[in-house]
Image (spheres, helix red, strand yellow):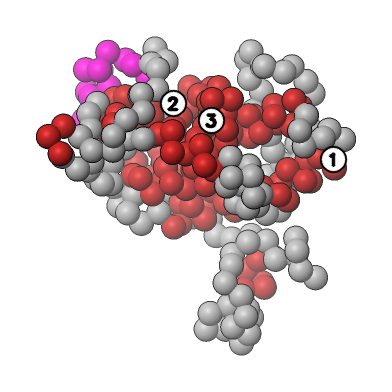
Amino acid sequence: MAEHLTRRQALKLAAGMGGALAAGAALPACGSSVGNAGERDPYPWPYLPLDLTKSGELGYENYRVGHCAYAVFTSIAGQVANFLGEPFTFFPFDMWRFGAAGIANWGTVCGTVNGASAAIALFFKEPDDMISELLTWYENTALPVYEPENPVLPMDMPATEAASPLCHLSVGKWIKASGFEASSPERTERCARLAADVTRKTVEILNLAFDRRFVFHGLDPQTQECLACHGQGKKNDDIKSQMHCTTCHD
């Protein structure tokens, strides 16, 4: 688990930092991942409870800085780094630009959940249940639902259920439902709002884990039914996955 700060310690630290989070402090500049005098960054990082509203705003804004994976990871880890100072602010946040469009435009895992999973693992040594909770929510929720106060592109935003954590399927279903092209500004707006949704959900999970109130609700029932017969140690040892099965298979 994470190296917890108590809530009292977290609030005291936040107050001592001059309320940077509430004031919307700029994200830390990129730099070396090594602190002063060759110090190694501590792992896992101590976590500070974050504000859902502010985190969603940052996720939306940062999408247009470095795309999806960058937006989610930096909007979460960057806030904590600003609170904690060096060596945390030396983290090379720009590296997360690689996650755009399902990793370098390959359409594999959606960059939002890629960056979110890394953020969870940054604070907790046993992140699997939290990541599974996030991915199950992502597969089964019609997204995006986030409505920015000052949208870059005001529009009535269609929401679609991905039924998969893959960028190709997530974006493809939205394109089919909305009628907009993949290269359209509307699709860009969709993914920026999606980044806000995933940032908020990840912060919600992390905040619960900080308070030791997180509970993994399990995979969706249909997937559980498939995995009862398929997978390691089962009758048919023929898969290695926990994704929605019927999205791609009969």
Whether the magenta-drawn stretch holds residue 107 is answered as: no
Q: Name the spot of residue 5 as percent of width and height, x first.
A: 23, 37
Q: Looking at the image, is 150 positioned above or below residue 117? A: above
Task: Please report contact status of discs 1 and 3: CB closer than 8 Å, yes or no.
Answer: no
Residue 166 in the figure: left or right of residue 90: right
Residue 107 in the figure: left or right of residue 76: right
- Counting the numbered discs, the total is 3
Which residue is label 2 attached to?
51
Task: Please report contact status of discs 3 and 2: CB closer than 8 Å, yes or no.
Answer: no
Q: Is residue 4 visible?
A: no
Mark pair 1, 3: CA separation:
26 Å
Which residue is label 3 attached to?
66
Q: Looking at the image, is 74 positioned above or below residue 1? A: above
Secondary structure mainly formed by the magenta segment: helix
Query: Residue at 25% of width from left, 17% of height from top?
Result: 17
Mark 3 against mark 2, which lies toward the viewer?
Answer: 3
Element at label 3: helix
User: Label for residue 177?
Assistant: 1
- Mark 1 surroundings: few (<14), some (14-19) or many (≥20) residues within 10 A: few
Element at label 2: loop
Q: Name the spot of residue 138 as percent of width and height, x first.
A: 62, 47
Q: Is residue 66 visible?
A: yes
Q: Looking at the image, is 84 positioned above or below residue 34? A: above
- The stretch of residues the image draws in magenta is 7-22
Mark 1 against mark 3, which lies toward the viewer?
Answer: 3
For this orientation, the residue located farthest to the left is 37
Mark pair 3, 2: CA separation:
22 Å
Query: Residue at 28% of width from left, 34% of height from top?
Result: 32
For this orientation, the residue located farthest to the right is 179
Query: Residue at 68% of width from left, 61% of height from top?
Result: 244
